[in-house]
Image (cartoon, rainbow, N blue to C red):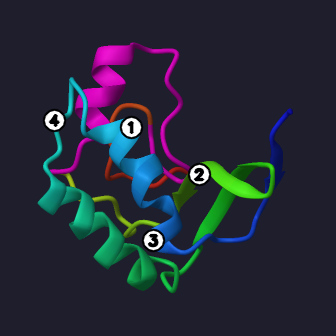
Amino acid sequence: MPPVFDDAVPSAAALRPIYAAAFAPPPWHETPDQVEAFVARLPSQTGRPGFRCVTARVGGEPAGSAYGFDGPDPWPADRLYRPIADALGSATPPPSGRSATTPNSRSG
């Protein structure tokens, strides 16, 4: 049965086994306490500005989910964007409103 995608946010408890299956094995090795921390923080994250979620369902049950929300502007220099962009190379576009050479500068 192919997955069906929607923008309904499943309960954190429904995502617990999916999160654990993704992040408990190598290379992340998240502990049961870290999985529970995800379950505890997700409800507060759904209220953040710009929150968006896409959920894949199989047979009506969550099978996967991706979510995100707006970050601070300007983006903090100590965050991971620059090391990730450097590792991926010049094909990586900067976040919206940021210059490719300086992660904290605004374009336009």
Instruction: State yes or no: discs 3 and 2 in contact (Cβ < 8 Å).
Output: no
Whichever of labels 4 and 2 marks the residue nearer the N terminus, that label is 4
Residue 99 quadrant: top left
Task: State the SS at label 2.
Answer: strand
- What residue is shown with label 1? 22
| Whole-number angstrom distance, CA of label 3 to CA of label 4 | 20 Å
Whichever of labels 1 and 4 marks the residue nearer the N terminus, that label is 1
Residue 86 % position (x, y): 29, 21
Task: State the SS at label 4.
Answer: loop
Does 51 sit above or below residue 93?
below
Residue 90 % position (x, y): 45, 15
- What residue is shown with label 3? 13
What's the mark number on residue 29?
Answer: 4
What's the mark number on residue 65?
Answer: 2
| Whole-number angstrom distance, CA of label 1 to CA of label 3 | 15 Å
Nearer-the-camera pick, 22 or 51: 22
Does 82 sit above or below residue 74?
above
Name the residue rendered at 64%, 66% in the picture.
52
